Amino acid sequence: MSDEAATREQLFDELNKLRDRVAELEADRTKAWETDEALRESEERLKLALAGADEGLWDWSIPTEEVYFTPDFVERLGYEPDEIESSVGGWKGITHPDDLSSIRNDLIDLMKGRVQKYENEHRMRAKNGEWRWFLDRGKVVESDENGRAVRILGTYVDITNRKNAEEALRELQAESVRAAHLASVGELAAGVAHEINNPINSVINLAQILINECGSKTLEYDIAGRIIREGERIANIVTSLLSFASQRSDEKVPFHLHHVMSETLALTKTQVRKSGIALRVSTPENLPIIRGNPQRIQQVFLNIVNNARQALNEKYEGAHENKILDISSDVVTANGISYVRTTFYDTGTGIARDIKDKVLDPFFSTKPAGKGTGLGLSVSHGIVSDHRGRISVESKEGEYTKVVIELPAQVNNEKENLGR
């Protein structure tokens, strides 16, 4: 074979090898394209699955402290993508400080292998300042040669609505327990009141006979008068017990809250001013009409005003520029219902945090022995509830107490004849 033929054959061999290599590269390219396409399809399926479950994805590189969140997470919180730093620091910056320790402890348990899965519920701050609840779940997906976790992958889901529903349920359950407690104590109160009522009336009547038969300057006359006063105090307590125990529905009529407040203050204004309390009242005459029992509502107002007066007197012995009782009324709307809201705000002793939730319970009192029965606010709560209203107490010990009463306004009250 000539040198030229040998060279030609060698070139053909090289050409065939190049063709085979090109074919291999083409196959590799096709395989890579197919792999990329499969990866894109897998990512798309993951996005659809996360969207369907209303979940997002986070990826934490522990050595670099980089944290990746899927875009919908920052959008759900109202931020632009570049407003939250993709790092542990950025994540901590929008996490509620009270929840950081529990998150840290749960992540440490995961990284040390004490648990196989991380799960934690915590709050994140939205751009508008709202705290939203999220459920985090995660798992270690990569470890180093020493078995230390270097990457954690997880999901999150917004559970704010669930948390709000749980809180509403807890409040409803607490209210149910309170109602059951009030009912059982009411039965006891009714029995005790009836047992006391007859003998105490006899004591008062006998003391009155003594007064009628004794001279006004005698010791017997003075003692009989004291007996009557103490007997009447007991009778008032009995009346409160009977009122508390009563399950009857009083007759309800349309009335103006302004008139009831005026009558209430007519009974208490002298005592309030004598105590050196600055009384500020704003109850407009044009408030919507309320349908209810004005005497029972007056009982509620009297109780709250008396509580405020005692709290102010306890904090300030005499007159003081901060010895103030503020009473105001306005109209609010909730769930499509209009309420006449009356707020009593005093700058007295306030209520300690650990007992604030108990002040509506029957027989619970912050007053010393002999100063009250503890029925006042629980009776008020019952009266307001009977009127389909709401009562709430807000207080800070040593600074103030605010009692808010909301009573539903009467529908179409402009057509009601008040007879005034």
Image (tube, rainbow, N blue to C red):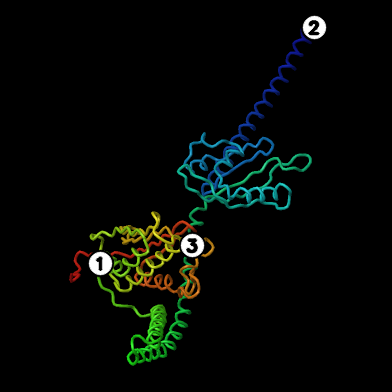
Which mark sits nearer the N-terminus, 3 or 1? 1
Q: Residues within 10 Å of mark 3 (few under 14, many from 20)?
A: many
Where's residue 327, x and y in %? Answer: 34, 60
Q: Amino acid at mark 3?
A: Ile
Q: Position of residue 66 (x, y in %)?
A: 63, 36
Left or right of 417? Residue 260 is right
| Nearer to us in this view, 46 or 207 | 207
- Separation of residues labelled 3 and 1 (CA atoms): 30 Å
Q: Is residue 334 visible?
A: no
At numbered mark 2, what does the secondary structure look like: helix, strand or loop?
Answer: helix
Earlier in the chain: of badge 3 and badge 2, it is: 2
Whole-percent x and y of residue 18?
Answer: 70, 19
Q: Residue at x 18, y 71 (%)?
A: 419
Picture residue at 42% right of the left edge, 72% below the top: 376
Position of residue 24 relative to residue 150, above or below, is: above
Q: Quadrant of the N terminus?
A: top right
Q: Mark 2 vs mark 1: which is more N-terminal? A: 2
User: What residue is disc 3 on?
Assistant: 351
The relative height of residue 232 versus residue 64 in the rendered view (above or below) is below
Q: Nearer the viewer, residue 69 or 363?
A: 363
Give the structural element (helix, strand or loop) at label 1. Answer: helix
For label 2, the residue is 3
Query: Which mark, residue 259?
Result: 1
Q: Is residue 413 left or right of residue 162?
A: left
